[in-house]
Amino acid sequence: MPTPRSLASLLVLPGGLALLTGMDAGLTLAGVPAPVGSARLAELHGPLMVLGFLGTVIALERATALRAGWGFLAPGLCAAGALALVVLPEPLAGRLLLAQGLLTLALVYAALWRRNRDVTIAVEGLGAVLALAATLLLTRVEVAAVLPLLIGFVVLTIAAERVELARLAMPSGAGDRVAVLAGAVALAAATAVAVAGSPVVGAVAWRALGLTLLLLTLWLVRHDVARRTINATGLPRFAAAALLAGYVWLALAGLLLLLVGRPGGSVYDVVVHATFLGFAMSMILAHAPVILPAVLRVRLPYHRAMWVPLVLLHLTLAGRVLSLALVGIGLRALPVWQLALLGNVAALLLFLLTSVVIGTRATRAARRPAPHETVHHA
């Protein structure tokens, strides 16, 4: 019978495939030469990255925390959905599998909540419900129509997890406060989708989403331990830098939504990638040395090389935003946007490669017998 460790190792592969395929799709969508360059996959760029990759990773981490065999149905179904999106000519089967995975994830959160009645788990469960609603709606509408729900899924999950991980450093009642702010984000996101047919009310809902994102981000920045650990060394400083940089990008997305309302054109691109690249991926880089060993039971010690993909990710994303801003004010940007996009992909690939190399070397070092053991057996 497969062990949780072997299940995790198997399920992370389709999630990784969703990430790689999603990056390829993003290049194709932007008109940049890509290894595969499939027009069909280009249309699935968003679902592959957010639901296929992030959905599988989040479900896998929560299933590991639950420590119950049935919980692995959540990442298993999400992984199967991601795989189906990649290989099947029609996306319906993949979307339905993803929906079943996210529904199971919501049940995992319910089981975790019954264990200790932690309000942060309820917030993460609400995020899973938003993702489930987005997945079901994607069978009938385009990704842009469900963007608020996808933003809510990622932001609620990460915000609640930050409070869960840094609870001792946060003020009393932090869980209740983040629940109120997260509930406001979820309400604004759901309203923006529900009233999409009304330009006036829809614009107000999008601005409300921007305001609630800003308020939640400012609260997290104020109380997150990262403000203190940025002055430390090693892993605490690396994680703090990734966390604070992620908060900056989420604040930018919230500010743009507050000022503009329903995003379009260049603003849409900035909001999407500030949230899912600048915020979500930066948070993954921050937590990887802690979460990956817990989920996959592999060693991933901190190494200075981890700074390279982190810095590259944020520099290239800043270049991408700057080039779009230049176009927005009427200046013709050189191929900076395309180069920045390639830099985004390179940063994520470099992070994967760095993690594999560091993890492999650490695992081999751990298995190598100590000098006194070698002498003894000789």
Image (cartoon, grey):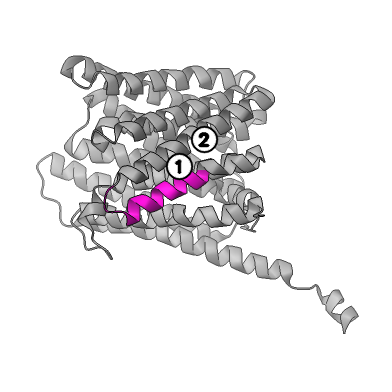
Query: Residue 71 occupies which quadrant of the picture?
Result: top right
Q: Secondary structure at mark 1?
A: helix
Query: Residue extending furthest right?
Result: 376
Q: Position of residue 142 (x, y in %)?
A: 23, 36
Query: Residue extending furthest top?
Result: 201
Q: How far apart in space, not on screen, are marks 1 and 2 (Cα)?
A: 9 Å
Residue placed under numbered mark 1 in the picture? 55
- Residue at 34% from the left image edge and 50% from the top image edge: 85
Q: Secondary structure at mark 2?
A: helix
Which of the two residues, 134 or 373, is positioned nearer the viewer here? 134
Q: Position of residue 68 (x, y in %)?
A: 66, 40
- Residue at 38% from the left image edge and 18% from the top image edge: 187
Which of the two residues, 114 or 335, is positioned nearer the viewer here? 114
The answer to whether the residues at label 1 and label 2 have Cβ atoms under 8 Å apart is: yes
Q: Main secondary structure of the magenta part?
A: helix
Q: Amino acid at mark 2?
A: Leu
Tell me if mark 2 has few (under 14), some (14-19) or many (20+) residues whose alpha carbon lies within 10 angstroms of its own. many
Query: Residue 65 occupies which quadrant of the picture?
Result: top right
* Highlighted magenta segment, given as a residue range: 75-90
Relative to 362, residue 302 above or below: above
Q: Amino acid at mark 1?
A: Gly
- Dot 1 or dot 2: first in sequence order is 1
- Residue at 32% from the left image edge and 29% from the top image edge: 148
- Residue at 41% from the left image edge and 41% from the top image edge: 98
Which of the two residues, 48 or 230, is positioned nearer the viewer here? 48
Residue 2 in the magenta stretch? The answer is no
Q: Quadrant of the N terminus?
A: bottom right
The reply to whether residue 240 is in sight is no
The reply to whether residue 25 is in sight is yes
Residue placed under numbered mark 2 in the picture? 105
